[in-house]
């Protein structure tokens, strides 16, 4: 009898010791993982860039990513006088400009998304964007006649892509390209490549709200990406989506805007009118494998209107969307519904139109 009790006590001691050992191991491992995570924030591509990287090669990977982002900005920014895009614009109506593989790829994609979105996305919008100066220190409302005359210059079909000579041109003088609506998506894809080459398994790439979630979180759970509240943007979310290896890109009227006489003028311009888009959509999020697709589409569908946009996204394989309308209704396409949760009760989920 005594022997049996002793045996049981012994067993309990062994089990308790085992539990303590496992707990210590798990805590230690988690600490090691968090030590391996680094978050780096810096300015680039006209926005705040935030890289959260986990893994052994994280410092090298971040350095290489920053170099890559620099190269992309130098080639594609309209604010750099001698970028490839600026050179295309300077030679508009005169000659084609030989460009790098990067720039050719992005402009080619931009034209593809212009077609898909029936011209609501249009990278030749530059002459209109520069009239408004939105995002600069001195934005303004252009006159009707300025808009009418510059609107004639907007037409993505006037982009000349010559694959043989790897050069790009514009048919008419004064036309100009602006790939601000798609370049960040490409940049996010390129950062992801850099990370993968460095065997990074877990990272969150955030280029001013243009997000790519690489792998899962270090603890193997899904990344949770917040969908910003377009009405109240003090870091508030209306809901979260859970993803791994996905790009999440949002176009919203709150990104860059100015107010005059109580009216908001934002930076997403409807190429048909030359004025900021006034569709019922005030936030469009695209969930996709490639961020360039997400970026190109999110700008286009923002302008297109809800019904057409839902149809378009449902027709594209592997691409999903979440839309928020002026009256706080939220729509999600079929592939993301189950991974999306509204956390703000002011917003109402609508299952269909
Ligand atoms: P953000 O730059 O805030 O992420 P978007 O990806 O939606 O937002 O891109 C908006 C930018 O794209 C604008 O700042 C402007 O440079 C350009 N743009 C504005 N309207 C259009 C349009 N209809 N088609 C293509 N590009 C646009
Ligand atoms: Mg975009």
Image (spheres, rainbow, N blue to C red):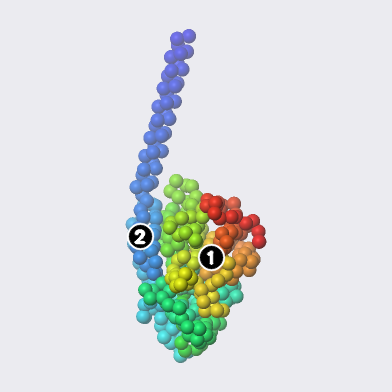
Question: Does residue 81 sit above or below 64 in this rendering?
Answer: below
Instruction: Left or right? Give the position of 54 relative to 123.
Output: left
Q: Pick whichever, 141 or 349, lies toward us.
A: 141
Where is residue 321 shown, x and y percent of the image?
57, 61
Q: Which residue is mark 2?
A: 41
Dot 1 lies on which element? strand
Mark 2, other Cα within 10 Å: few <14 / some 14–19 / many ≥20: few
Q: Which residue is mark 1?
A: 282
Dot 2 lies on which element? strand
Where is residue 248 shown, x and y percent of the image?
50, 60
Instruction: Left or right? Give the position of 287 relative to 260.
Output: right
Where is residue 2 shown, x and y percent of the image?
45, 9
Instruction: Left or right? Give the position of 137 relative to 317.
Output: left
Answer whether labels 1 and 2 touch (C-beta < 8 Å): no
Q: Is mark 2 within 8 Å of ligand 1?
A: no
Residue 180 seen = no
Q: Which mark is residue 201?
A: none
Q: Identify the residue shown where x is 48% and y is 85%.
A: 146
User: Dividing the picture into quarters, in which one does residue 70 lie?
Assistant: bottom left
Q: Identify the residue shown where x is 59% and y is 71%.
A: 304
Q: Residue furthest bottom?
A: 94
Q: Pick whichever, 273 or 204, lies toward us.
A: 273
Distance of label 1 from label 2 (alpha carbons): 27 Å
Question: Does residue 271 sit above or below 302 in this rendering?
Answer: below
Viewport quadrant of the C terminus: bottom right
Q: Residue furthest right?
A: 353
Question: Does residue 204 sit above or below 266 in this rendering?
Answer: above
Q: Is mark 1 within 8 Å of ligand 1?
A: no
Q: Identify the residue shown where x is 37% and y is 39%.
A: 28
């Amino acid at each position: 009898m005594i022997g049996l009790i002793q045996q049981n006590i012994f067993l309990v001691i062994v089990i308790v010791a085992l539990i303590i050992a496992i707990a210590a191991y798990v805590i230690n491992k988690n600490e090691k993982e968090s030590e391996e995570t680094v978050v780096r924030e810096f300015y680039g591509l006209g926005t705040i860039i935030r890289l959260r990287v986990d893994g052994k090669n994280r410092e090298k990977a971040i350095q290489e990513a920053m170099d890559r982002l620099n190269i992309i900005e130098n080639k594609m920014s309209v604010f750099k006088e001698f970028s490839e895009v600026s050179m295309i614009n300077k030679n508009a109506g005169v000659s084609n400009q030989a460009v790098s593989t990067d720039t050719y790829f992005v402009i080619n994609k931009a034209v593809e998304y212009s077609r898909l979105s029936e011209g609501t996305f249009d990278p030749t919008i530059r002459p209109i964007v520069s009239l408004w100066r939105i995002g600069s220190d001195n934005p303004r409302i252009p006159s009707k006649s300025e808009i009418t005359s510059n609107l004639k210059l907007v037409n993505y079909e006037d982009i000349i892509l010559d694959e043989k000579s790897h050069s790009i041109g514009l048919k008419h003088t004064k036309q100009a390209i602006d790939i601000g609506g798609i370049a960040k998506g490409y940049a996010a894809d390129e950062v992801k490549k850099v990370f993968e080459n460095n065997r990074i398994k877990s990272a969150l790439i955030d280029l001013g709200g243009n997000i790519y979630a690489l792998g899962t979180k270090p603890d193997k759970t899904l990344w949770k990406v917040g969908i910003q509240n377009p009405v109240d943007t003090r870091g508030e979310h209306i809901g979260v989506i859970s993803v791994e290896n996905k790009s999440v890109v949002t176009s919203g009227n709150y990104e860059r805007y100015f107010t005059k006489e109580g009216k908001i003028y934002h930076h997403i311009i409807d190429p048909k009118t030359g004025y900021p888009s006034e569709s019922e959509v005030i936030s469009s999020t695209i969930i996709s494998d490639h961020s360039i697709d997400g970026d190109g589409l999110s700008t286009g569908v923002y302008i297109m209107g809800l019904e057409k946009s839902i149809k378009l996204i449902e027709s594209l394989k592997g691409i999903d969307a979440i839309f928020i309308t002026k009256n706080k209704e939220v729509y999600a396409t079929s592939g993301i519904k189950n991974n999306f949760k509204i956390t703000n009760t002011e917003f109402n989920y609508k299952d269909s139109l």
